[in-house]
Image (cartoon, grey):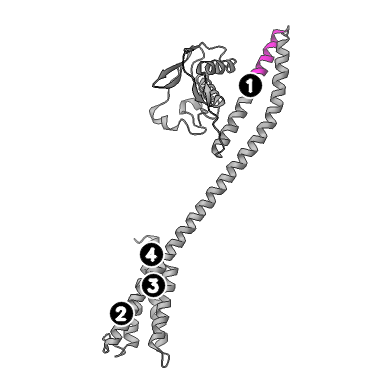
């Protein structure tokens, strides 16, 4: 059974040969037709076929045109033989010209198609870039609009907590509000950072950072979520400073701690350690979770990805490692 592309090519080849044969017989009916005119007409037909369909079709048209030119116009007419040596030269010249012209036309068509595809790909990439920039700008604006009331809520709740409410229930509610305000602020900041990365607008501002201090700050910011957990920080204050972006490192540490809280038993401990090795500082967050299957390790940085078992028992949209 013929495939559709192959069947279409067979049809185009037949149409190419039929077109040249039809032109040849039509010109043979004209009185006193000039051989040069016939050859040029057939050559134009071959070029048109090469431009429209391609090299194979134009080569078939060239052969069909050569046979028709020989049979209908070169003496002795009506036979496949050629009496005059000059006519041999004319026939060979036609075949070579038609073949070379077909190749050049087909090559030009391929280049034009390739250039069109390249321009289309460039246009799509530019459209995607502009879309990401627009999304990033919108998120920046939304983040500003969100952070303004969140800052006010945070200040108000902190002020109420500092007054030591007499009612324990009221104090507990205020603490929940305080923690959830911090959580919302983090979520807004992370969303903006992801949008900036995708739009190519992320700026990493490296400055010397003290890892022990960053770890303590990350734990402090996660105090609400870590309240029921035993968190052990195995960090030496003698560790060297490292060049890094402070806010981005805090986001990483916060995300790892958040995952440890989500995906481990409620009463299990979390250990954060930092060690120096070959001029670098390695920070590790270890917990008692089930771990990630080896088959899923290459997907942990996909957006919204979570393991199969985690989807069933842990609410959320992903591990946050994207």
**Is residue 253 or residue 76 the one in the foreground?**
253
Q: Secondary structure at mark 3?
A: helix
Asked whether 241 falls inside the magenta stretch, the response is no
| Residue at mark 4 to residue at mark 3: CA–CA distance | 26 Å
Q: Which residue is mark 4?
A: 7
Q: Residue at x 37, y 75 (%)?
A: 17
Q: Earlier in the sequence, mark 2 or mark 1?
A: 2
Relative vertical location of residue 13 with respect to residue 185 in this rendering, above or below? below
Q: Residue at x 41, y 70 (%)?
A: 50
Q: Which residue is mark 1?
A: 182
| Residue at mark 3 to residue at mark 2: CA–CA distance | 14 Å
Q: Which residue is mark 3?
A: 101
Relative vertical location of residue 95 with respect to residue 217 in this rendering, above or below? below
| Residue at mark 2 to residue at mark 4: CA–CA distance | 31 Å
Q: Residue furthest bottom?
A: 31
| Residue at mark 3 to residue at mark 1: CA–CA distance | 72 Å
Q: Earlier in the sequence, mark 2 or mark 4?
A: 4
Q: Residue at x 43, y 77 (%)?
A: 44
Relative vertical location of residue 276 with respect to residue 16 in this rendering, above or below? above
Q: Is residue 10 visible?
A: no
Asked whether 170 falls inside the magenta stretch, the response is yes
Q: Position of residue 65 (x, y in %)?
A: 36, 79
Q: Nearer the viewer, mark 2 or mark 1?
A: 2
The magenta stretch spans which residues? 167-183
Q: Earlier in the sequence, mark 3 or mark 1?
A: 3
């Amino acid at each position: 059974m013929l495939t559709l592309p192959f069947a279409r090519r067979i049809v185009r080849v037949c149409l190419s040969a039929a077109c040249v044969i039809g032109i040849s017989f039509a010109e043979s009916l004209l009185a006193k037709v000039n051989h040069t005119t016939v050859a040029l007409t057939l050559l134009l037909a071959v070029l048109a076929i090469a431009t429209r369909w391609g090299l194979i079709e134009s080569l078939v048209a060239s052969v069909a045109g050569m046979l028709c030119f020989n049979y209908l116009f070169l003496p002795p007419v009506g036979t496949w033989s050629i009496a005059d040596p000059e006519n041999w030269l004319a026939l060979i010249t036609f075949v070579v010209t038609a073949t070379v012209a077909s190749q050049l036309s087909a090559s030009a068509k391929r280049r034009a198609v390739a250039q069109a595809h390249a321009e289309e790909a460039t246009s799509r990439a530019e459209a995607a870039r502009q879309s990401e920039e627009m999304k990033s700008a919108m998120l920046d604006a939304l983040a500003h609009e969100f952070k303004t009331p969140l800052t006010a809520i945070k200040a108000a709740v902190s002020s109420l907590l500092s007054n030591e409410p007499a009612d324990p229930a009221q104090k507990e509610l205020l603490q929940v509000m305080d923690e959830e305000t911090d959580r919302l602020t983090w979520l807004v900041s992370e969303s903006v950072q992801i949008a900036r990365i995708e739009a190519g607008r992320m700026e990493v501002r490296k400055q010397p950072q003290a890892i022990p201090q960053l770890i303590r700050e990350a734990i402090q910011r996660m105090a609400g979520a870590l309240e029921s957990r035993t968190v052990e920080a195995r960090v030496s204050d003698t560790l060297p400073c490292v060049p890094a972006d402070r806010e981005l490192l805090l986001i990483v540490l916060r995300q790892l701690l958040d995952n440890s809280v989500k995906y481990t038993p409620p009463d299990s401990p979390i250990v954060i350690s930092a060690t120096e090795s070959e001029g670098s500082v390695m920070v590790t967050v270890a917990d008692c979770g089930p771990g990630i299957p080896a088959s899923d390790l290459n997907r942990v940085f996909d957006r919204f990805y979570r393991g199969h078992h985690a989807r069933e028992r842990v609410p959320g949209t992903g591990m946050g490692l994207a």
